[in-house]
């Protein structure tokens, strides 16, 4: 394990922002982790854990140590008649894990196909898409407390999952390194295809879903047609979270904007942040090196050479205009560093 100095993070964040880390190290095993926790460069500096860099925005150089998760391995812990329990190490690519499940006919994570990044970062914001969330099939999260270097196994409840949220993004932020997760997947058909965009896709194309691969193929196809590829255009997916309001707030908004889209989720009502941004005239707008994607107003893009601060300036302008027009507060989904 080698600690590198003044290391460029340019290729390690999908926004394609130029930023350096004072120290940088990749961990390949739990043994590496134990060693790392005892190093003075680790103990004496600010720390940041990095997976695929697909949900971070660097606004400056990182004046500390960046630890890249390269822990690999996927194993089947239990194989029962109806279910299978899978343990995946945190440095695995999330989409590869989805492909492993789909190709084996296991149901549960097919709706989460093509989400960039690593397995270890997935619990951070309880990744979600097309009507599914990680928490729907997560059993436990293994994580090392960085102070004591001790491993703790968090059950689902202890992860305090919410919409793009978890305990690791709140009280335990920066305190644990997620080393592995365990998922329970179904071997018997358990499709989740009521999400409107998916349901419409199957109906329009006259597809009868027979296996998780049918769903995964559809999700991959839909995502390709809507989302910019970070390899071509720097971005971190949805920059903002959707907004949740109560019935009273919704009624007030509907008086002024009768067409406002809204979806009931549990007790709350979700308003798509992309719609709010679009109504403020931001969709497809470009300011210098940065802009709002032409097909998806939730996605901010780097046209090349942008700094993290330029992205933040654009994000702040959007937040202000949505606040002025609708009285609603947008908050970033992306982790600002
Ligand atoms: C084109 C595109 C589409 C996207 N679509 C979706 C989507 O549909 N749904 C969705 O939920 N997300 C989406 N995202 C966001 C992103 O893919 C997910 O949040 C993903 O889980 C991030 O993984 P990562 O490994 O890249 O994390 P990183 O960006 O490397 O890290 C994200 C955060 O987690 C922390 N972290 C990373 N690894 C660890 C670890 N092992 N232990 C502790 N902390 C850690 C980091 O410090 C940082 O704060 C999209 C992103 C892009 C670019």
Image (cartoon, grey):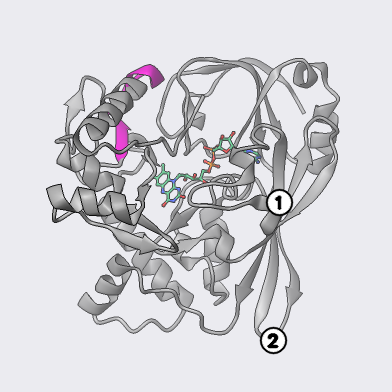
Q: What stretch is highlighted in magenta?
A: 299-310
Q: Where is residue 71 in the image (x, y as percent from the top left)?
A: 70, 45
Q: Is residue 244 left or right of residue 251?
A: right
Q: From where the camera sits, is residue 35 visible?
A: yes
Q: Distance between the residues labelled 1 and 2?
A: 24 Å
13 vs 133, nearest the viewer: 133
> Which quadrant of the view contains residue 279?
top left
Residue receiving disc 2: 81
The quarter of the rendered structure image containing the N terminus is top right
Residue receiving disc 1: 180
Q: Position of residue 296 (x, y in %)?
A: 25, 45
The answer to if 297 sits in the magenta stretch is no
Q: Which residue is drawn at 40% across and 31% down?
A: 15
Q: Which residue is drawn at 48% across and 51% down?
A: 163
Q: From where the camera sits, is residue 73 visible?
A: no
Q: Which residue lies furthest to the front in this view?
A: 248
Mark 1 neighbour class, 10 Å CA radius: few under 14, some 14 to 19, many 20 or more: many
Element class at badge 1? strand
When the figure is inspected, residue 27 is found, relative to residue 114, above or below; the finding is above
The answer to if 309 sits in the magenta stretch is yes
């Amino acid at each position: 394990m080698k600690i590198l100095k003044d290391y460029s993070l340019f290729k390690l964040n999908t926004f394609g922002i130029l930023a350096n880390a004072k120290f940088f190290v990749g961990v390949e095993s739990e043994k590496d982790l134990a060693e790392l926790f005892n190093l003075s460069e680790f103990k004496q500096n600010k720390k940041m854990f990095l997976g695929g860099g697909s949900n971070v925005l660097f606004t400056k150089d990182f004046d500390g140590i960046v630890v890249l998760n390269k822990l690999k391995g996927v194993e089947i812990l239990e194989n029962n008649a109806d279910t299978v329990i899978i343990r995946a190490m945190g440095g695995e690519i999330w989409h590869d894990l989805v492909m492993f499940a789909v190709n084996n006919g296991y149901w549960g994570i097919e709706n989460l196909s093509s989400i960039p990044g690593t397995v270890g970062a997935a619990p951070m914001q309880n990744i979600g898409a097309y009507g599914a969330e990680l928490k729907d099939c997560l059993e436990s999260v293994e994580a090392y407390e960085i102070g004591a270097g001790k491993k703790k196994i968090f059950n689902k409840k202890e992860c305090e999952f919410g919409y793009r949220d978890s305990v690791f993004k709140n009280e335990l932020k920066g305190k644990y390194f997620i080393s592995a997760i365990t998922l329970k997947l179904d071997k018997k058909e358990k499709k989740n295809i009521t999400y409107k965009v998916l349901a419409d896709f199957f109906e329009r194309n006259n597809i009868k879903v027979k296996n998780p691969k049918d769903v995964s193929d559809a999700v991959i196809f839909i995502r390709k047609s809507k989302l910019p590829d970070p390899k071509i255009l720097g971005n971190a997916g949805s920059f903002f979270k959707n907004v949740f309001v109560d019935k009273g707030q919704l009624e007030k908004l509907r008086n002024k904007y009768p067409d406002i889209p809204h979806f009931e989720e549990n007790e709350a009502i979700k308003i798509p942040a992309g719609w709010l941004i679009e109504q403020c005239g931001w969709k497809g707008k470009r300011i210098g090196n940065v802009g709002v994607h032409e097909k998806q107003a939730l996605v901010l893009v780097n046209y090349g050479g942008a700094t993290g601060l330029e992205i933040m300036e654009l994000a702040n302008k959007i937040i202000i205009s949505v606040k002025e027009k609708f009285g609603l507060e947008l908050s970033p989904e992306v982790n600002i560093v």
